[in-house]
Image: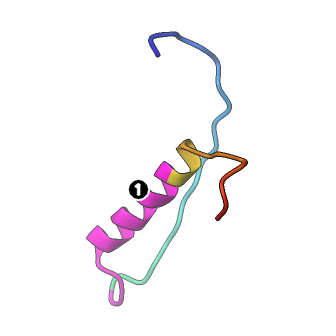
Amino acid sequence: GDAIAIRHMMFLSHSYDHRIVDGALGGSFVRKVADFLENWDINRTI
């Protein structure tokens, strides 16, 4: 929508060993977690 509204926000962070996990893979994981949380449906089975 085009509406300006006050919303709840949550800050999320993670860390990983760069010797084991590539930065692109870590970023992809964070993006998927963010997408999951932004499109949360309480009726969806996990």
Residue span colored magenta: 19-35
State the residue at coordinates (44%, 11%). Answer: 2
Quadrant in which the C terminus appears: bottom right
- The correct choice, above or below, for 10 with respect to 46 in the image is above
State the residue at coordinates (65%, 25%). Answer: 7
On the picture, is 12 further left or further right than 30? right
Looking at the image, which is closer to me, 14 or 5?
5
- Most extreme residue toward the bottom is 20
Q: Residue 6 location in percent, x, y?
A: 64, 18
Q: Main secondary structure of the magenta part?
A: helix
The residue under label 1 is 31
State the residue at coordinates (64%, 44%). Answer: 10
- The correct choice, above or below, for 21 with respect to 40 in the image is below
Identity of the amino acid at label 1? Arg
- The correct choice, above or below, for 2 with respect to 16 in the image is above
The question of residue 1 being in magenta is answered with: no
- The correct choice, above or below, for 40 with respect to 31 in the image is above
On the picture, is 32 further left or further right than 37? left
- Most extreme residue toward the top is 3
Q: Residue 28 location in percent, x, y?
A: 35, 64
Looking at the image, which is closer to me, 42 or 8?
42
Q: How is the image coloured?
A: rainbow
State the residue at coordinates (35%, 63%). Answer: 27
Q: Residue 14 location in percent, x, y?
A: 52, 67
The question of residue 23 being in magenta is answered with: yes
Looking at the image, which is closer to me, 12 or 3?
3
Callout 1 crowding tier (Cα within 10 Å): few <14, some 14–19, many ≥20: few
Q: Secondary structure at mark 1?
A: helix
Looking at the image, which is closer to me, 2 or 6?
2
Q: Residue 45 location in percent, x, y?
A: 67, 61
